[in-house]
Image: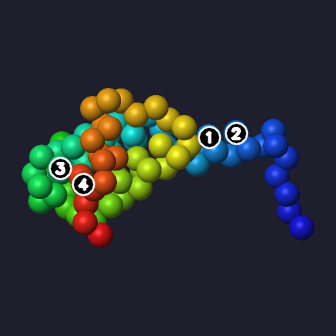
Amino acid sequence: MWSIHPEQIRPIVDAFSPRADEITLAAEILLAAQRAEWGPTRHGDSLHDRASYHYYWSVLRCAQATGHAMPDAYAPLFDSSSQPNK
């Protein structure tokens, strides 16, 4: 049987949580997608569509679940009416 000591929890959560730059990138892409009504968008040299939007949405969900503070500009992304259709 395996177990995790309470002192190991924070390092494990930190290891699996997204970095600040990943959170910023995900939010920028999703905010652009929302403005484009979830149609294809370009960010830098990359094109994004619904498949990548789902990935970036999972990055933000993970960030929120692991205790990262979300800037106010990103709060609308967590409004259920603004989430991409599954």
Q: Along the polypeptide, which appears first: circle 2 or circle 3?
A: 2
The label nearer to you, 4 versus 3, is: 4
- Say the numbered circle drawn on residue 10: 2
Label 4 Cα crowd, 10 Å radius (few <14 / some 14-19 / many 20+): few
Marks 3/1: CA–CA distance: 29 Å
Q: Along the polypeptide, which appears first: circle 4 or circle 2?
A: 2
Secondary structure, mark 3, is helix
Marks 4/2: CA–CA distance: 32 Å
Residue type pointed to by label 1: Asp
Q: Residue beneath label 1, please?
A: 14
Q: Return the residue nearer the eye: 7 or 81.
A: 81
Is residue 45 something one can see in this rendering?
A: no
Marks 2/3: CA–CA distance: 33 Å
- Say the numbered circle drawn on residue 34: 3
Q: Along the polypeptide, which appears first: circle 4 or circle 3?
A: 3
Q: Residue beneath label 4, please?
A: 81
Residue type pointed to by label 3: Gln
Check if mark 3's residue and mark 1's residue have beta carbons within 8 Å: no
Marks 2/1: CA–CA distance: 6 Å
Check if mark 2's residue and mark 3's residue have beta carbons within 8 Å: no
Label 1 Cα crowd, 10 Å radius (few <14 / some 14-19 / many 20+): few
